[in-house]
Image (tube, rainbow, N blue to C red):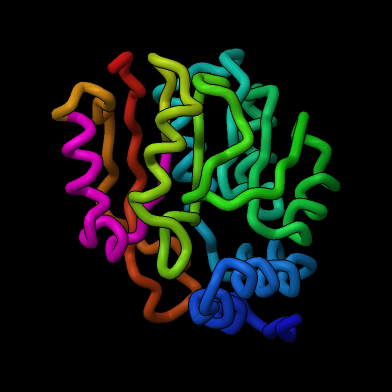
């Protein structure tokens, strides 16, 4: 298992450099115990941005909601405070899911990897949120087809997307889904730096789509 780094920047470097999904999971397993404190110190913004977008476009009381790439449950904890649920958390890292379980806000936690077939029924979720996952070396546009499958028509998909991922096929792919009548774009934030406390952090953006019937 990788050694745990002293800062968010150290640990992000390890997981971004992972050569395969198993190495990524091992990196997050090693980081799980210090993740929340280090990300707070780095000024991590993605969960708050995701929560704001969800609150603007999907009212509490409509569930279930999937937290895709839930990590230690930073986003799920905020969603629960505003009355969203039942919440289902999914993550590649068992260590991160164990920390999420300790927060007591998830009805169910699932160890699985975005970009593969997910263990959920068609249209199972009223909404999907994923913060800090569509990023370097993690998840790209290839994960969208499954998110569409498991979101019911009329449901919202709320994502934060790193600009490098956005420009490397993600924006184009989502535009094609909109032209096909499968998605409708509802909102996109201006680019922002997700971790002001980590020098050199690349910007990302928050996005919301409605899953259409097509």
The secondary structure that most of the magenta stretch takes on is helix
Which residue is at 17% across, 37% downward? Answer: 176
Residue closer to the observer: 86 or 141: 141
Q: Is residue 213 above or below residue 44?
A: above
Q: Is residue 173 magenta?
A: yes
Quarter where residue 88 is shown: top right
Percent position of residue 94, x then y:
76, 57
Which residue is at 69% across, 47% downward? Answer: 73
Which quadrant holds the C terminus? top left
Which residue is at 54% across, 72% downward? Answer: 20
Percent position of residue 95, x then y:
78, 61
Q: Which residues are magenta?
A: 158-178
Q: Is residue 2 above or below residue 211?
A: below
Q: Is residue 48 magenta?
A: no
Percent position of residue 106, x then y:
75, 34
Left or right, 158 with respect to 213, comes to right
């Amino acid at each position: 298992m990788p050694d745990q780094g002293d800062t968010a920047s150290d640990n992000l470097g390890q997981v971004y450099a992972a050569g395969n999904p198993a190495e990524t999971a091992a990196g997050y397993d090693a980081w799980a115990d210090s993740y929340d404190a280090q990300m707070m110190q780095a000024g991590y913004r993605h969960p708050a941005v995701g929560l704001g977008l969800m609150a603007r476009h999907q009212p509490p009381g409509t569930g279930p909601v999937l937290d895709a790439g839930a990590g230690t449950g930073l986003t799920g904890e905020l969603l629960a405070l505003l009355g969203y649920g039942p919440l289902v958390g999914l993550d590649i890292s068992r260590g991160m899911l164990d920390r999420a379980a300790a927060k007591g806000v998830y009805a169910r936690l699932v160890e699985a990897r975005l970009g593969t077939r997910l263990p959920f029924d068609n249209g199972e979720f009223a909404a999907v949120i994923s913060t800090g996952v569509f990023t370097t070396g993690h998840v790209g546009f290839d994960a969208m087809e499954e998110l569409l499958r498991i979101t019911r028509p009329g449901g919202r998909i709320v994502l934060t997307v790193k600009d490098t991922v956005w420009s490397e096929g993600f924006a184009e792919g989502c535009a094609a889904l909109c032209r096909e009548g499968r998605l409708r774009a509802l909102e996109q934030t201006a680019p922002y730096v997700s971790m002001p406390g980590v020098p050199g952090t690349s910007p990302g953006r928050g996005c919301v789509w409605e899953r259409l019937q097509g």
